[in-house]
Image (cartoon, rainbow, N blue to C red):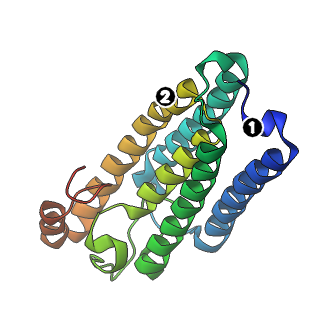
Amino acid sequence: MSPLYLTEQWALIVYWTLLSVWVLSELLVFATHVSRSGDWRQDRFSGVAVIAGVLVTISLGSRLARGVPEMAIVTSVPLFWAGVLIGLAGIALRWYAIRSLGRFFRMRVMTVPGQVVVESGPYALVRHPSYTGALITLLGVLLCSTNWLTLACFLIALPGFAYRIVVEERALVKALGDPYRDYMRRTKRLIPYLL
């Protein structure tokens, strides 16, 4: 069975709307939070790793959904809509995390003078809720393909995010010291109480 967005016009519109909202929201984040100052060497190409992982995941997942329709999940309409809702929830979580971090949020791994450990909003539960939101969005987009192989492609994006988190946490420990180390002991990286 092919993905709904290949067989149903309404699903194609909904799917591309979800992708467009995600891309436009990321472009807005970039436009409003890119910083030309500071030491960008701390980033160590981790942003590129995340973006490349996401693009490969979506591209390969979409091709597998088309190319291996026998791996389709039977209950496709409810799962398609679940994917849309999960994707939108991920976008909302990412924006909530960005707003909670406020002036300390940057697109690149870098710290700013006067930076403190933020423990409000979603940061009370996890250290990287913005990445959690991005991963939830990615999972939702993949779920829209309603194909087991496409869902398995989610694993492709994880190394890029893991690398980004390691790079970011090193920079934060170096800049913020013990307050950030204490925060790391109290919170998980992506999923409250688990991971």
Q: Residue at x 48, y 37 (%)?
A: 157
80 up-or-down from 188: above or below: above
> Closer to the camera: disc 2 or disc 1?
1
Dot 2 corresponds to which residue? 152
7 up-or-down from 16: above or below: above
Q: Give, as a three-letter code, the residue at label 1.
A: Leu
Nearest the eye: 72 or 108: 72
The disc at residue 136 is: none
Nearest the eye: 58 or 32: 58
| Classed neighbour count for the residue bearing mark 2: other residues with Cα under 10 Å, few (<14), some (14–19), many (≥20) | few
| Classed neighbour count for the residue bearing mark 1: other residues with Cα under 10 Å, few (<14), some (14–19), many (≥20) | some
How far from the left and from the top, in percent, is residue 57? 58, 33
138 up-or-down from 169: above or below: above
Callout 2–callout 1 Cβ contact below 8 Å? no
9 sits to left or right of 17: right
Q: Quadrant of the N terminus?
A: top right
Pick out the residue farthest to the right. 9
The disc at residue 4 is: 1
Task: Say whether disc 2 or disc 1 marks the residue closer to the N-terminus.
Answer: 1
Q: Give, as a three-letter code, the residue at label 2.
A: Ala
How far from the left and from the top, in percent, is residue 49? 50, 39
99 sits to left or right of 85: left
